[in-house]
Amino acid sequence: MTKKLKVFNLNGEPVDTITLPPLFSTPIRPDVIKRAVLAIQSNRLQPKGRDPMAGKRTSAESRGVGLGIARIPRIKGPAATGAFAPGTVGGRLAHPPVAEKKIVKRIPKKEKRLALLSAIAATSSKEMVISRGHSVEGVPQIPMVVVDDLENLKRTKDVEETLIKLGFLSDILRVRKSIKVRAGKGKMRGRRIKHAIGPLIVVAEDKGIRKAASNIPGVDVVTVRNLNPEVLAPGTHPGRLTIWTKGAVEMLGKLYGGGGED
């Protein structure tokens, strides 16, 4: 079933209409989306392991029985400290991490495609967007379609003003209220600030808006060709509040079938 939507200009006024591609009617499958997101995240993990000889470079030998002491391997000398054997003070690890462990999760291509289309369809469901935690008060329609002039914005101030005119002020404020300093070692490892996820802007071509929007907390910009389940469903939860440019919707229809201008 096709669905017609209004196309808004940068002042939040409807100026045109567009027919959504049929892929926006794809059944929403949270289980498949979760598998795809975890597969993407697993590719960022760094393999780690221990030296295979760790804890084995020692002269430790067991002294046998009849001495009134435990038969664990002990280093040579008067200290007679236990070594080598797992479970002893100063001994090696029993089953240490190995770099050869398979930590990358893989899913079939068809399942990956279904996850992407399902995540795209979830952005058009108002119930999913609200259940994910977004504030849609003031947003005239979901999904939001805007003219291609949005791609040409090159200043953070202009992007912020446009988002406010389009009705996304409440969601931007929700993100800003959520900003806090992380508790733990992550503060020293480039993950000092935590905040909620805000709106996603999908464009056909990046003409400067990505850099302009990078300083607005929670707002992300992605081109249609770089769409993936993780940006559409952060944390494996589908239904992200999304702004599509008209050109992005038309390109989406060409890439994945169906759709076009009314």
Image (spheres, rainbow, N blue to C red):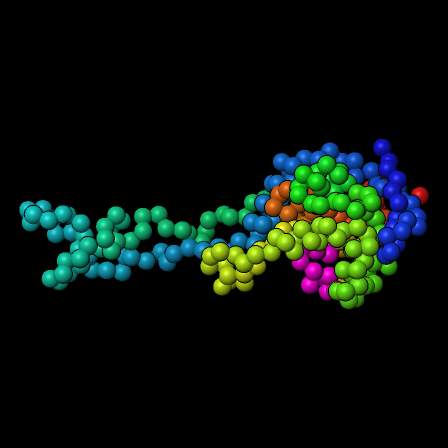
Instruction: Give left or right: position of 161 versus 228.
Output: right
Asked if residue 96 lies in the magenta stretch, the reply is no
The answer to whether residue 152 is seen in the rendering is yes
The percent position of residue 218, horizontal first and vertical second, equals 67, 55
Q: Quadrant of residue 177?
A: bottom right
Residue at image position (27%, 49%) is 86
The percent position of residue 133, horizontal first and vertical second, equals 66, 43
Q: Nearer the viewer, residue 244 or 135?
A: 135
The percent position of residue 134, horizontal first and vertical second, equals 69, 45
Q: Quadrant of the image for the C terminus?
A: top right
Q: Nearer the viewer, residue 241 or 92?
A: 241
The percent position of residue 122, horizontal first and vertical second, equals 73, 40
The answer to whether residue 115 is seen in the rendering is no
Q: Quadrant of the image for the N terminus?
A: top right
Residue at image position (84%, 41%) is 21
Q: How many marks?
A: 0
Asked if residue 220 lies in the magenta stretch, the reply is yes
Depicted 105 relative to depicted 212: above or below: above
Highlighted range, magenta: 211-222
Instruction: Give left or right: position of 181 versus 24.
Output: left
Depicted 123 relative to depicted 207: above or below: above
Q: Quadrant of residue 179?
A: bottom right
Residue at image position (87%, 42%) is 5
